Image (cartoon, rainbow, N blue to C red):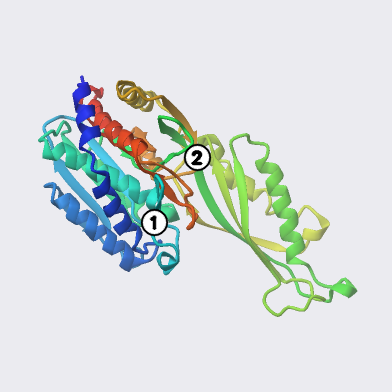
Amino acid sequence: MIQVSLLQQAYTWFDERRFVEMLMRLSAINSGTHDTVGINTKVDLYQEWLRSLGFETRLFPSTEYGNNLAAVGEGEGKVALALFGHVDTVYPVGSVSQHPPRIEKDQLYGLGTSDMHGGNLLLTEALRFLVERNLKPYGKVLVLLNNDEEWASMHSRPWMQRLLLEHAIHVGLEFESQEEWIRGINVTVGRRSQSAYHLTVRGKEGHAGLGEGISAVDALLFKLLRLRELVAQYEGMSINITGLFGGGDGMHYTTRAGDAGATVSFRATSPQEYFKIGKLLNRIVANEEPEEQGSEITITPFNHTPPPYLPTPQISHLAELGRSVAEELGLPFTTGLKGSTSDANAFADVGIPVLASLGPMGGGDHNATEEHILLGDPLREKFAFVVGLIDRVCALWKM
């Protein structure tokens, strides 16, 4: 049983000044997906910090995405934990010069502060607290920081899942931020999936005034409208359409477009919905409307996550352990499902129970001007909660 004194020690020990200095240092480095220089620079910093705690580290490089980092620490317990986050952000090279990190009142603004270097640092600082006090309740801790989460971890996911199985991980804890508008502690117990496709339609150019040719744009629009109607039949599924194009550069406005395309991204809440997406796409291949006749569509998958996951008995048990820690801290505790996807899906995909949103309270994700985390009591309380959760899971997890 966790003693309240451990939580009090963690709350008092937390050094916000150190945390802020480290996070501002990270936020001042560009590390958008594919920015290998920035990603490798940040990974080097995390590797240095984890090595200083006695962790054995290993880099898994990629010429396209930069380094992934795995770090292993041995403890005195039986439970094998995986603590994980990602190093890449959504911002292009050069963004830092326009949006340098800054502090306004009790908020730290900067690229990647909320998504998700604030959480990565909370992870490493929690481990530092435990190691400095020679408190190692776990049997093993595997820290994973990957380089392409913002692109659905298409490259790093096989590496991550292989290590989870090789190290016989029992529980996963993810350190993305918690929405700032939710009081107390809120953890994520389920996530939707994401699947993206390029749609390309080929028609035939011709004189529009004379009624010649086959408009690829018209055909695409009818297919997209039909696809939206199909998706609307499923309560937990949604679709986002971007990247519309048609006709090509320089095409005259009197000419029917011979080519058109779009990118479609699906979100699904249940595995049943997830596996219906391919069937829905197949239903728009046929040319049902007069405007579609004579056109041809090509559907190319290019980005996807594992299936969505919902709370299992093991995930619910994890959440109840978290609730007991929050109660000892005198904080409200809630759980929720998230519409976004993350590497937590990859854990659930191989049968590992996972609890997410263990990072700082924050907001403005994917917005260079507004991304931030909360400082002060919310940050200190979340740190104490994370320390207590690690200790509680290691003590009471049912193997």
Mark identifier at residue 102: 1
Locate the C terminus and report the quarter of the image it occupies: top left
Quick one: label 1, few (<14), some, or many (20+) residues within 10 Å?
Answer: some
Q: Nearer the viewer, residue 214 or 151?
A: 151
**From the viewer's perspective, is residue 132 above or below residue 154?**
above
Identify the residue shown where x is 29% and y is 21%: 328
> Residue 299, percent across and down?
60, 58
Observer-nearest of 244 and 255: 244
Q: Where residue 310 appears, x then y in whole percent?
A: 46, 31
Looking at the image, can residue 336 be seen?
Answer: yes
Label 2, secondary structure: give it: loop
Numbered mark located on residue 170 in the image: none
Among the two numbered marks 2 and 1 on one chain, the one whose residue lies closer to the N terminus: 1
Residue shown at the point (68%, 66%) measured from the top left: 260
- Of badges 2 and 1, nearer the viewer stands 1
What residue is disc 2 on?
A: 192
